[in-house]
Amino acid sequence: MSTTAVRAWSRVRSLLPGRDDLVAARRDPRRDLLAGLTVAIVALPLALGFGVSSGLGAEAGLATAVVAGAVAAVFGGSNLQVSGPTGAMTVVLVPIFARYGAGGVLAVGLIAGLMLIALALARAGRYMSYVPAPVVEGFTLGIAGVIGLQQVPGALGVPKPEGDKVLVVTWRAVESFVRTPNWTAVALAATVAAVMLLGARWKPTVPFSIVAVIGATVAAQVFHLDAAKPIGALPAGLPAPSLSFLDPGALGSLLAPAVAVAALAALESLLSASVADGMTVGQKHDPDRELFGQGLANIAAPLFGGVPATGAIARTAVNVRTGAGSRLAALTHAAVLAVIVFAAAPLVARIPLAALAGVLIATAIRMVEVGSLRAMARATRSDALVLVLTAAATLALDLVYAVLIGLAVAGALALRAVAKQARLDQVPLTADPSGDHSAEEHALLAEHIVAYRIDGPLFFAAAHRFLLELTEVADVRVVILRMSRISTVDATGALVLKDAVAKLRRRGVTVLASGIRPGQRQVLDSVGALDLLRHDGREFATTPEAIAAARALLQGAGVLTVPARPATVAPQSATVPAQPAAVTEEPAP
């Protein structure tokens, strides 16, 4: 077997379940079984509701929770993660269903699963840490708003209007309700949401969602509330695996939606796994293995009629809080839901749609962490702007565009902040105070030589400001550039430095450089900047050597006739107000 094949197989093996997973499942199985049962009770109404919201029906939500939940539990990278249909994924699936139908949603899920496996093999999980917190908070807030708005038709008891823009659909649903009010549906949805929200404050450990749904179902049956439309008949069991939804001719047009689904599945799953780690001591997920497990889950779920799945933050949090310690809890959750699918389908079919709408409205409200949002908004204006833009884009556009917009704005603001750290400090020269003529020499040096210390990054975002400041140097004979404190330099910064040196030389100003770091030489050399600085030996290791060379040039030109004295450089206030880079400058004697 070739070296490449060995490495590839080793990479795949690192993503597969190991003996440690089995050992962890044997530590406290009773506690894990109880946690899994609790999570299943919480997950049942959510799975039904998200299945209905996606357009594929309640059975699709249940199939996703069972199949994807089991596969991700076995192959995922977190011991505590619970996967299944989520509100965030529903937000993305609604326009896909409106355009491509149920077959398109299933095909998109399968393609997204393959993409997630490719990301896992490429070790892309580590990049989750680069997503800024304001972007995460912003799209979480936006998702909460979209989930809540998506439930308006069900809560009002009106047929869901046509369209894939949630704001438009919500407005049309309100118009339909005004024409034919259905106060029974409104009462059921409001009651279920109120029971969940108030009950969570009273006794957080009690699954009030299932209590409220059971109560609403019983009330609809006892009082014959015809206006409370039920879910409808569910299949007694999972369908046989099938690829009949694949249309080879339409796969090309589904790639873009699949990228959106894969991106969301990766982002939400890794975020949920990180939340689980933060709620426990000693647990740490493997991000690449988590992507691998979610990829397999999204390949398996469509085969049984399920929608794309992700790690579910709410269900994962319940799993952790109820004492789960291994993957056995998430597997138990999937097994309990499977039993419900096979044994209780007729009962589940009687649940009113308005009750599920109430569950999801309460879920959306509980997703909004007011304290976290307030803290983020107060941190900096940039953080507040990114948060608001991401949330607004989620409502007006879709989640993937919102995240891209948030990342772009956050990146631009970060570059702006980093660019402000770049400094061009004029450092006056002082002669050795001992000996004769020191005052005269100091006056001549100050009149003909100017030294600048460049602090911080010299890159594209700060380079042009640097060029303007450096080329505005007053009439002097020699400019010394102290470069040891440049933290980083890119091609743009190197080109601007080259341009500045060339302009100064055309004005008859000699430019000397000191302290160029080895890591900066390649960039400077690639654009020809070093050629100018090396001209006639005008690059020096230290600043004192550069000052001595400048003095020699002035003496050779007959400008400086006093005896040579050792010189030092003393820093003074910066001409560009910003924070200095924490880089050690070479000592000057």
Image (cartoon, rainbow, N blue to C red):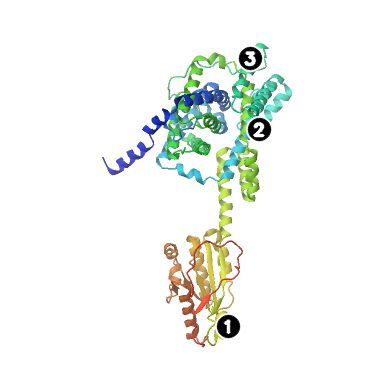
* Amino acid on which the number 3 mark rests in the picture: Val
* Label 3 crowd (10 A; few <14 / some 14-19 / many >=20): some
Q: Residue 11 lies in what quarter of the image?
A: top left
Q: Pointer 3: what residue?
A: 218
Per the model, the C-alpha gap separating discs 2 and 3 is 33 Å
Q: Between marks 2 and 1, how big is the CA–CA gap?
A: 75 Å
The mark nearer the N terminus, 1 or 3, is 3
Residue 168 badge: 2
Residue 443, label in figure: 1
**Residue 245 can be seen, yes or no:** no
Question: Earlier along the polypeptide chain: callout 2 or callout 1?
Answer: 2
Query: Where is residue 133 shown, x and y percent of the image?
Result: 57, 44
To which quarter of the image does residue 293 belong? top left
Front position among marks 2 and 1: 1
Q: Give the position of the N terminus as an image quadrant.
A: top left
* Rendered position, 57 above or below 586: above
Q: The residue under label 1 is which amino acid type?
A: Ala
Evaluate whether residue 485 shows in this view.
yes
CA gap, disc 1 to disc 3? Answer: 96 Å
